[in-house]
Image: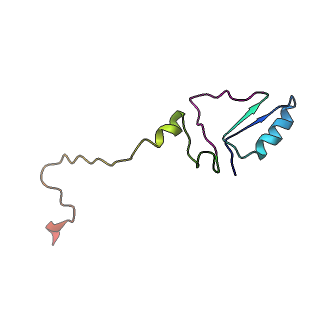
Amino acid sequence: KYGLAAAVFTADVSRFARINNKLKVGIVWNNCSQPCFCQLPWGGPKLSGNTTRDLGEFGLKKFLEPKQIVHYVAEGALDWYNTSSL
């Protein structure tokens, strides 16, 4: 149901790798919990973040709205529908 974060406490790196691969969460800590880097996305799958990510470049995307801007610079009007050949 939730998947924000998980902490695994083990000295066995192979065991950590196996557990990590099975976890469906946004961040996994090994032998600690809570530190994160603001350059990396924060959030998780399922109900822990509603598939959105905060922080880093991922976090910026939700504040952006794409827009096309076309600047026509040729002489004369743009004959979009090619009416001159009719």
Vertical relation: 13 (above or below) 64: above
Closer-to-camera residue (17/34): 34
Q: Position of residue 34 (x, y in %)?
A: 69, 29
- Name the residue rendered at 23%, 46% in the picture: 71
Q: Residue furthest left?
A: 76
Q: Main secondary structure of the magenta part?
A: loop
- Name the residue rendered at 84%, 32% in the picture: 13
Q: Position of residue 78 (x, y in %)?
A: 18, 56
Q: Is residue 40 magenta?
A: yes
Q: Is residue 53 left or right of residue 1?
A: left
Give the number of callouts: 0
Q: Position of residue 76 (x, y in %)?
A: 12, 53
Q: Report which quarter residue 6 is drawn in.
A: top right
Q: Is residue 15 left or right of residue 82?
A: right
Q: Is residue 79 magenta?
A: no
Vertical relation: 53 (above or below) 29: below
Please provide the residue range marked out in magenta. 32-44
Closer-to-camera residue (35/64): 35
- Name the residue rendered at 19%, 45% in the picture: 73
Q: Position of residue 39 (x, y in %)?
A: 56, 29
- Name the residue rendered at 78%, 46% in the picture: 22
Q: Is residue 26 left or right of residue 14?
A: left
Q: Is residue 9 left or right of residue 53?
A: right
Vertical relation: 2 (above or below) 84: above
Q: Quadrant of the C terminus?
A: bottom left
